[in-house]
Each structure stands twice: as structure tokens, then as C-alpha cells.
């Protein structure tokens, strides 16, 4: 039974692993991670789940496109200050940081960073990347194609229903 008054239909929707090709951020059209459906600005998005350190660190790196209603939902095992960088990203990305209730606390537009230069060490590359940080402790982050959050009118203070009790239990 869902806790904190989360409607059963919402929790069930959050657990659906989608097989609908062409909606994911992966260029092949096939999800490499479990996918949840989340409503952002009145539109349904298929978001790949990043629930462990490896998938959260990799994020959407290397993607050459992100579908209009695709992206990634980062779930952290605890509430804390979080940061993102555009490591090896080939397309602009928007990120929304959400607190443990699903309220948006910070939004960033992240443009493409210059690629790693020939002979540049991994450490030097990492140090020159712009860091995008949450303005408050958060439990979740959502990344979508650059410009989509503005198109959707999603901003600070908005609530994104996530069925968070179920998602938090998956974070490692």
C-alpha cells in the first residue's frame, strides 16, 4: 500500500518498464535501464532510472540526441546537496533538482562543453567542466533535452509527482 497518500495509479505508473521504442535517450531506441513514466508540464516522459553511483555518474553522457519526451531520473539514497556536469555530453541538457517531496528547487540549462582535448588528462578535463549544483538538499534530479523545461513551463516551486516511496527504495 502506498504511503504518504500517493495514489495507487501513480505508484503503478512509476513501476511500468516501457518497451515503447523511439522514446528513450539512447540512440538505438532501446532503453539500457528501467524506465518510469513521469508527467512534466502536462506531458508524459519516459525517463531512464539512474539509481546507483555508476548510472548516476554516467548519466546521459555520450548521447547524440535525447527524445522530446525522454531523459533520465536520478534517484539518490539520501537527501543532500547534488551537482551535475556535462561530462562527454554531445547535446544540451536541462536539469531540475527536486527535494524529497518532488518539489523543484533548482533548474539549470547546461550547454555542451568543449570536448576533451588531445593530450588533456582526465583530471584536467574534469576540473574545467562547469558544475551545476542544487540550491538546497535534494533527493532527485531530472535531465531532459535542452530547452524542454522552459517549453513545459516547469520551474522552481513546481511539484513533480514521482511515487517517491517506491523510487527511493531502489536507490543505492
Image: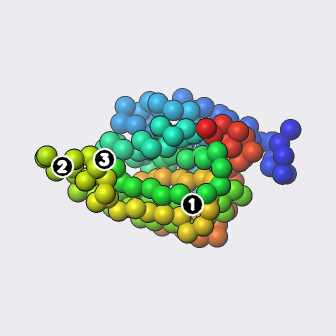
Precedes in sequence: disc 1 or disc 2: 1
Residue 112 as seen in the image, left or right of residue 33: left
Query: Which residue is disc 3 drawn over?
Result: 88
Frontmost residue, 36 versus 104:
104
Label 1 sits on a secondary structure element that is loop
Which of the two discs, 2 and 3, sits closer to the camera?
A: 2
- Residue drawn at (60%, 53%), measured in percent from left and top? 140
Residue 60 as seen in the image, left or right of residue 33: left
Q: Position of residue 134 (x, y in %)?
A: 53, 64
Q: Is residue 112 visible?
A: no
Frontmost residue, 76 versus 20:
76
Work out which quarter of the rendered image holds the C terminus and state it.
Answer: top right
- The Cα–Cα distance between marks 2 and 3, rounded to whole angstroms, is 13 Å
Q: Report crowding for label 1: few under 14, some 14 to 19, many 20 or more residues within 10 A (C-alpha).
A: some
Q: Position of residue 27 (x, y in %)?
A: 35, 36
Frontmost residue, 84 versus 9:
84
Disc 1 + disc 3, Cβ < 8 Å: no
Label 3 sits on a secondary structure element that is loop
Query: Which residue is disc 1 drawn over?
Result: 81
Q: Report the colour scheme.
A: rainbow
Q: Position of residue 25 (x, y in %)?
A: 42, 41
Q: Quadrant of residue 110?
A: bottom left
Q: Report crowding for label 2: few under 14, some 14 to 19, many 20 or more residues within 10 A (C-alpha).
A: few
- The Cα–Cα distance between marks 1 and 2, rounded to whole angstroms, is 29 Å
Residue 155 as seen in the image, left or right of residue 94: right
Query: Which residue is disc 2 drawn over?
Result: 120
Residue 48 drawn above or below residue 102: above
Disc 2 + disc 3, Cβ < 8 Å: no
- Residue drawn at (60%, 47%), measured in percent from left and top? 76
Precedes in sequence: disc 2 or disc 3: 3
Work out which quarter of the rendered image holds the N terminus and state it.
Answer: top right
Residue 100 drawn above or below residue 18: below
Amino acid at each position: 500500500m502506498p504511503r504518504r497518500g500517493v495514489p495507487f495509479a501513480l505508484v503503478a505508473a512509476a513501476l511500468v518498464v516501457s518497451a515503447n521504442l523511439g522514446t528513450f535517450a539512447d540512440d538505438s531506441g532501446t532503453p539500457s535501464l528501467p524506465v518510469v513514466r513521469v508527467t512534466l508540464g502536462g506531458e508524459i516522459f519516459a525517463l531512464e532510472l539512474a539509481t546507483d553511483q555508476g548510472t548516476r555518474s554516467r548519466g546521459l553522457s555520450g548521447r547524440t540526441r535525447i527524445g522530446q519526451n525522454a531523459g533520465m531520473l536520478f534517484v539518490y539514497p539520501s537527501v543532500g546537496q547534488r551537482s551535475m556536469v556535462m561530462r562527454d555530453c554531445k547535446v544540451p541538457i536541462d536539469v531540475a533538482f527536486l527535494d524529497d517531496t518532488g518539489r523543484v528547487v533548482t533548474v539549470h540549462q547546461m550547454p555542451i562543453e568543449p570536448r576533451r582535448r588531445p593530450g588533456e588528462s582526465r583530471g584536467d578535463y574534469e576540473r574545467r567542466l562547469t558544475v551545476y549544483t542544487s540550491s538546497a538538499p535534494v533527493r532527485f534530479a531530472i535531465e531532459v533535452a535542452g530547452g524542454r523545461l522552459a517549453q513545459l513551463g516547469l520551474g522552481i516551486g513546481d511539484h513533480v509527482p514521482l511515487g517517491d516511496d517506491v523510487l527511493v527504495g531502489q536507490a543505492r
